[in-house]
Amino acid sequence: MRHVYVVGVGMTKWGVYPDKEWYDLGSEAMLNALDDAQLEWKDIQAVFAGSVYQGTGSGHQAVKEIGLTGIPIVNVENACSSGSSAFRLAYQAVATGMYDVVMALGMEKMPKGPIPSTAFRPLELEMGFNVQFANYALASVKYMKEYGATEEDFARVTVKNRRNGALNPYARFQQPVTIEEVMNSRMVAKPLRLFHCCPLADGAAAAILCSENKVKAKKRAVSVAASVLASGVYGEEMYMCGMVESVKYPPKEGIIEISAKEAYETAGLGPEDIDVIQAYDTMAPSELWDLEKLGFCAPGEAPRLLREGVFDINGKLPVNTDGGLMSRGHPLGATALGQIFELVCQLRGESGQRQVKGAKTGLAHAMGAGPNSSVTILVK
Amino acid sequence: MDNGKSIPIREGLWEVNEAGEIALIGSRCTSCGELFFPKKKNGVCTHCQGRNLESVRLSDHGKVVTCTVVYQRPAGGFYKGSVPYTYGVVELPEGVRLMSLLVSDDLEGIKVGSKVRLVIDPLFEDEEGRQVLTYKFKVV
C-alpha cells in the first residue's frame, strides 16, 4: 500500500439554503478543494460522493456543475458515515495504486424538520421507533444509570461545542449558549432537550487525496495514517437503527472499539498520541461515551474530564474544535468530511482563533445508522 | 378482541393459546440457543448462522431496561399512534430483549426496572375504521 496524502480541502458554510441544491453546494466544496490544492479539475481521476437523501446519481449532478470528463463517479450512502466512507474509498483507490489524485465529496441538502430516518424496518417505523433523539435518550438513560452522568454533564458538551463554533466561520451556529439555556430548552425525549441535539444543516465538504509522487506542496500536505470503517457486530446495542443488545451473546467489543483499535494499529499510534479530536456529537451525550470507547479515557470518566476543561481548545485533549455537529449543523452526507476538513486545517496550523498549538496528529470519529463507525487518523 | 373491527399490525407477531393466554412469537436457535423477536422469516440464526430455528412462545412479562418519553410526532408519517408516547427496551426472563411501546396509567411512571406485562392494544384507527392492534408492555 502506498502512502496517501490530503493535499486540498474545501467546504461551504453550513446553514440553510432555500435557493441552493445539493449539487450547488457539492460543486462549491470541490472547487474550494481544488483551489486549496492548487490543482486543475482535469487532474482529478475519480470522485467518490457521499450523500444520504439526494437520490440516484447525486454525485454525478455535482460533478456536472464543473464538467464531466469521463472519470468514474461512485455515489456512497452510508448514513452519517457517508462522507468518511467516500474518503475511505478515495484513500483505498490511491493507496492501492489505481489512481494518483482522487476527490472525496460529502454533501447534503436536508429535508425540513426532524429526519424521517429510514434505517429502520417498516414495522419499526410504524411502531414509532425511528425517533433518533429518543434512541439516543434510551442509551443516555443507561449511561446515566451506570456512571452517574447528569443532564448538566450533557449540557456542558453543548456549551463547549457552541463556544468553539463561535470561532468557526463555516458553522451554522456561531453564537455560544449557556448551560441554563440548554437546561431550559424544551424536552424532546426524556432526558434529552432540544439543545442536547445537533441542528440539521445544508452543506458540503471535499478533500483531495493523492499519492506521494504527485504532492506539489509538501508543507501543506497531511498524511492519512488510517481510514477505517466497521459496520456492525452481532449483539451490540444500536438503538439508532433498531438493534437491541443480545443478553446471551453480547459482543466482546462494539464497533467503536473495533474501528478505533484497527485505526490505532494501522497508524502505529495510540490514543495518547492524538493532539486533536473530532468526535461525533450528534446528541450531546454521545460525545462523552464515544471518547471513552475510542480509548481516550476510562468508561464513565468523560463527564469529569469535560468539567475540568480537558476537552477545551486549550485543554490537554481538545475535542470538536470547530464546534462539532452542535455548531456546524448536520448535513448527513457531508458531516464526516467536515470533521476531516477541520483536522486538516488544524494540522496545517491554519485554524486561526481555534488553533490547537502544535497539533501534529488528529482523529475523527463518525457514527452512522446501519450501523457504521468510521475512524480517520491524520498526521502532519 | 377479534370482532372484525380490529386487525393486527402484522400477522404472526403474537398468538393466543387454547387457555386464552397471549404470547409473542419468537425464534430459538437449536444450535446456540439464541432467541429472536420477531420470528426470523428466513430461519437463519444471526448469531451462529445455524439454519435450524424453532418457533417459541415468549414470556408475557419482563422488566424495563431503558425507556424514554417522546413528546413530538415522529417524522415521515409512519407512526400513527398517539403522542406523547413511551417506548423502550424490555428484557424477558428467558434472556432476550426487545424494543416495545410501553404503557402505564401514569405516562411518567415508567422507569428502568419497572415490571411489565404484555398487552395487545390499539395503536391507531385505519382508513377503514378498524382498530390496528399491536403488542405493548404495561407496567404492573
Image (cartoon, coloured by chain):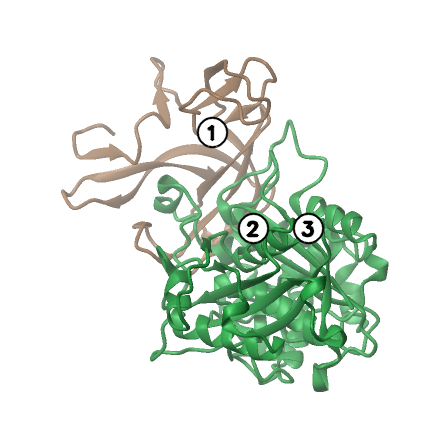
Chain colours: A green, B brown
Q: For the residues carrying marks 3 and 1, which lies nearer the camera in this image?
A: 1
Q: Position of residue B119 (x, y in %)?
A: 39, 33
Q: Chain of mark 3?
A: A
Could you classify mark 2 by the number of other residues whose Cα lies within 10 Å: few (under 14), some (14-19), or many (20 or more)? many
Q: Which mark is residue A145?
A: 3
Residue highlighted by disc 2: A138
In this view, the residue in front, A264 or A177, is: A264
Q: CA distance from mark 3 to mark 2?
A: 11 Å
Question: Which residue bears the numbered disc 1?
Answer: B37
Where is the C terminus of chain A found, in terms of image quarters? bottom right
Q: Amino acid at mark 1?
A: Phe
Q: Residue A211 placed where, x, y %?
A: 68, 60
Tell me if residue A144 comes above or below residue A220 in the rendering: above
Q: Secondary structure at mark 3?
A: helix
Dot 1 crowding, Cα within 10 Å, few <14, some 14–19, many 20+: some
B3 relative to A7 in the view: left or right = left
- Along the line of sight, the residue nearer the viewer: A45 or B17: A45
Mark 3 or mark 2: name the one nearer the start of the chain.
2
Comparing A372 with A162, the one in front is: A372
Disc 1 to disc 2, C-alpha distance: 19 Å
Q: Nearer the viewer, mark 3 or mark 2?
A: 2
Of B65 and A40, nearer the camera is A40
A345 to B24, vertically: above or below = below
Where is residue A379? Give x, y as percent.
Answer: 77, 64
Q: Is residue B85 left or right of residue A360?
A: left
Q: Amino acid at mark 3?
A: Lys
* Element carrying mark 2: helix
